[in-house]
Amino acid sequence: MNINQIYVNLPVKDIQKTKEFWTKLGFTINEQFSDEKAVCVVMKEDNIYVMFLTEEYFQTFSERPVPKGDTTQVLVAIGLNSREEVDQVVNAAVENGATQHEEPQDYGWMYQNSFWDINGHGWNVTFADLSQLPQG
């Protein structure tokens, strides 16, 4: 099996604020899949997208309730091309209303920073240099 695209669907309260937040972090929007009920954020062109759906619209895809309050249903991890890009995205997120999830972690071969976005979704942002991965 060869998956060629991934669409992650997450519920949100406010589409416009969500669109503005992710645009300020440097991500583009696929307007073809966006409207007043959904915004499609391009994580990797032609391959990976996050569909932020209003809670009401999200509910049309599942009979399970949307989590309320301080709950965590999923943590999404994205890999970037450098440590600088990782910190740039996390810092921009925090400057635009997100909260720091934990202190950055440096494992030598992998660097990670993280945030809770304006909708409470957790994002681990990483850079890994697999050539530095300890063997054995």
Image (tube, rainbow, N blue to C red):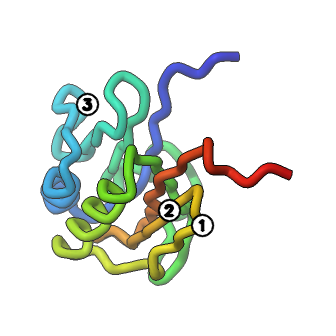
The residue positioned 25% from the left and 70% from the top of the image is 91
Residue 102: image x %, image y %? 47, 80
Q: Which mark is residue 111?
A: 2
Kindly state the secondary structure of the residue where label 2 is placed.
strand
Residue 42: image x %, image y %? 30, 37
Disc 2 marks a residue whose amino acid type is Tyr
The residue positioned 16% from the left and 51% from the top of the image is 23
Classify residue 17 by image quadrant.
bottom left
- Image check: 79 left or right of 28? right
Kindly state the secondary structure of the residue where label 3 is placed.
helix
Question: Of 58 and 133, which appears nearest the observer?
Answer: 133
- Image check: 55 left or right of 129? left
Residue 108: image x %, image y %? 57, 63
Q: Are marks 1 and 2 in contact (CB under 8 Å)?
A: yes
Task: State which quarter of the image contains the N terminus.
Answer: top right
Tell me if residue 132 comes above or below residue 106 in the rendering: above
Disc 3 marks a residue whose amino acid type is Phe
Q: Which residue is mark 1?
A: 107
- The outermost residue toward the right is 136
Q: Are marks 2 and 3 in contact (CB under 8 Å)?
A: no
How packed mark 3 is, by other alpha carbons closer than 10 Å (few <14, some 14-19, many 20 or more), is few
Tell me if residue 114 comes above or below residue 99 in the rendering: above
How packed mark 2 is, by other alpha carbons closer than 10 Å (few <14, some 14-19, many 20 or more), is many
For marks 1 and 2, give the CA distance. Answer: 6 Å
Q: Which residue is mark 3?
A: 33
- The outermost residue toward the top is 1
Tell me if residue 111 comes above or below residue 27 in the rendering: below
Task: Give the mark nearer the N terminus: 3 vs 1.
Answer: 3
Question: Of 51 and 5, which appears nearest the observer?
Answer: 5
Classify residue 94 by image quadrant.
bottom left
Classify residue 81 by image quadrant.
top left
Residue 71: image x %, image y %? 53, 77
